Image (tube, rainbow, N blue to C red):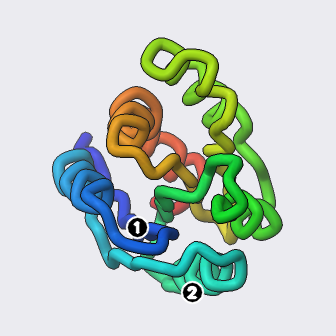
Amino acid sequence: METPTVNCELSKPASSETVVFDRQSTWTRNHSGTVLARTWVRDEVTAIRAALRKQLARRGVDAVVLSGGTGVAPRDVTPDAVEPLLERALPGFGERLRALSWASVGSAAWLSRAGAGVARGRLVVYLPGSAGAVRQALEALLIPELVHVVRLLGRF
């Protein structure tokens, strides 16, 4: 049975674009993913929420991956923007990412508010902005389960 392709949209909430965007794009091209669009969005609740709503309204989108803005600094507002739009939280994603991060960043791992959930029948994942954390989240958590979770959501 052929592995289906998951259609993803990528967002980077930040004051400027970073290399993490390119790493996400490479990942989706190489792991059953098609990038439908890449969006840079201001790190403001209203801007992030508006971009996410627009992405979720697109017919072919199966998953939206955001990276950046998940820490505790005042400018880190991605979870605040995303979580009210989620119909179902998937707390295990953030919990496991923080547990995995412990080995590389130690006690600072608990400062991350990364997470995942379901909105409008699509997977929404919000990752830290650092390249290492994005790589770890994609390789250890998201890639292994992406097709499975999207299938469970009835996207294909």
In this view of the protein, which residue sits in the foreground, 146 or 20? 20
Residue 11 visible at all: yes
Residue 43 coordinates in the image, percent (x, y) = 58, 73
Left or right, residue 21 beside residue 147: left
**Marks 1 and 2, how far apart at CA:** 12 Å
Q: Residue at x 63, y 18 (%)?
A: 107
Label 1: element kind: strand
Of all residues, the one furthest to the front in this rendering is 74
**Where's residue 63, x and y in %?**
49, 62
Q: Quick one: 10 or 63, which is closer to the camera?
A: 10
- Name the residue located 49 percent from the left edge and 22 percent from the top edge: 105
Query: In this rendering, would 115 be left or right of 62?
Result: right
Residue 135 position within the rendered picture, expressed as x and y whole percent measured from the top left? 33, 38
Q: Specify the quadrant that holds the N terminus.
A: top left
* Horizontal side of residue 146 vs 71, given as left or right: left
* Residue at point 53%, 44% (across, down): 149
Identity, as a three-letter code, of the amino acid under mark 2: Lys
Secondary element type, mark 2: helix
- Give the residue type that dot 1 points to: Leu
Assess whether mark 2 and mark 1 are in contact (beta carbons under 8 angstroms): no
Residue 22 or 36: which is nearer the viewer? 22
Q: Quarter-wise, where is residue 136 in the image?
A: top left
Q: Quadrant of residue 115?
A: top right
Residue 77 versus residue 101 in the image, above or below:
below
Q: Is residue 33 visible?
A: no
Q: Which residue is mark 2?
A: 54
Quarter of the image that includes the C terminus: bottom left
Callout 2 environment at 10 Å: few (<14), some (14 to 19), or many (20+)? few
For residue 10, the mark is: 1
Point out which mark residue 83 bears.
none
Q: Point out the tag, 1 or 2, that comes first from the N-terminus.
A: 1
